[in-house]
Image (tube, rainbow, N blue to C red):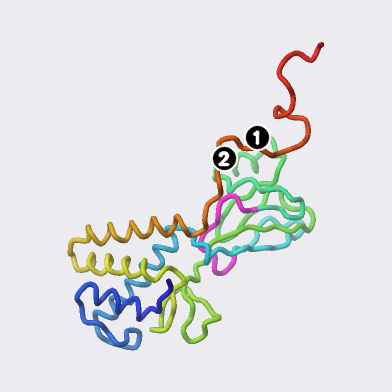
Amino acid sequence: MQLTALQIIRQAAAELGLNVPNEVAASTETTGQQMLALLNSAGMDLLIAHPWQQLNITHVFPSVAAQAAYALPADYAYYIDQTFWCSGDQEPMAGPVSPQAWQQVTAGAIALPSDQMFRLQAGNIEIYPTPAAVKDYTYQYVSNLWVRCGASPTNCKAQITLDADTPMLDGNLLVKALKVKMWNAKGLDTTLLVGEMNGLFSALIGKDKGAPVLSLSPRGGSSLLSSRNISDGSWGA
């Protein structure tokens, strides 16, 4: 369920027994302004806490011959593991590798990898060995634009600035997160509020993307000769 920023703040204020504001962004009232700031903080915390499917972006880019580093998208928040592929070669990229592993390979301390590898460095994604020709690459990341603009719903942004702005995260979860932050800022006990928020958070992340059916006896794979279809015993007979 998605709610506007004002709806979230009004609901949280009502549940906490505070004065329910009619407007926030254009108001100079202290409590409303504090709740708006804390709502932005809560949204950014939840953005980092889980790779919400509505914020998943697929980025496709072509390499340039003799160029190793490629800028990350402007709205990049963080990389989704195991999604980087050289789609031109239909092969996964190894990484992101640690600084130590990168140094070992690039300094020649160990043999060159048979596959390409990558790392995230200084706002870029770096590929090694450096592409010698143009190839297509693709990976997925989480966008930091978690708010749909109230003045222009087709545009998204990284912070709430208008009462009509609509966070793309669950509105009920944001209400609970805002209550925790508001009570914590006042130095009050948040034990019950944190429990409610964590319970809903766990339920939502379990349903956010669904889950595959897991089998205790998986089948499939290559139809070529392998340990799956070669009988035990000696081949000498």
Secondary structure state at the residue bearing disc 1: loop
Question: Relative to residue 79, is residue 46 drawn left or right?
Answer: left
Is label 1 in contact with label 2 (beta carbons under 8 Å)? no
- Spot occupied by residue 173 in the image (x, y as percentages of width and height): 36, 66
- Spot occupied by residue 1 in the image (x, y as percentages of width and height): 43, 71
Q: Magenta stretch containing residue 129, yes or no?
A: no
In depth, the one of 46 and 11 nearer the eye is 11
Which numbered dot is residue 9? Answer: none
Per the model, the C-alpha gap separating discs 1 and 2 is: 39 Å
Residue at x 31% of width, y 77% of height:
9
Residue at x 44% of width, y 77% of height:
166
**Comparing marks 1 and 2, which lies closer to the viewer?**
2
Main secondary structure of the magenta stretch: loop
- Spot occupied by residue 216 in the image (x, y as percentages of width and height): 55, 36
User: Quick check: 143 above or below 147?
Assistant: above
Count residues near mark 2 (Cα–Cα under 10 Å), then give few for <14, some for 14-19, many for 20+: few
Rendered image quadrant of residue 230: top right
Rendered image quadrant of residue 107: top right
Secondary structure state at the residue bearing disc 2: loop
Count residues near mark 1 (Cα–Cα under 10 Å), then give few for <14, some for 14-19, many for 20+: few
Question: Relative to residue 20, is residue 107 drawn left or right?
Answer: right
Q: Which residues are magenta?
A: 73-84
User: Quick check: 205 above or below 13?
Assistant: above
For badge 2, the amino acid type reads: Ser
Q: Residue furthest right?
A: 237
User: Which label's residue is closer to the chain start, 1 or 2?
Assistant: 1
For badge 1, the amino acid type reads: Ile
Q: Read off the residue under disc 1.
A: 110
Q: Magenta stretch containing residue 79, yes or no?
A: yes
In depth, the one of 52 and 120 nearer the eye is 52
Q: Read off the residue under disc 2.
A: 215
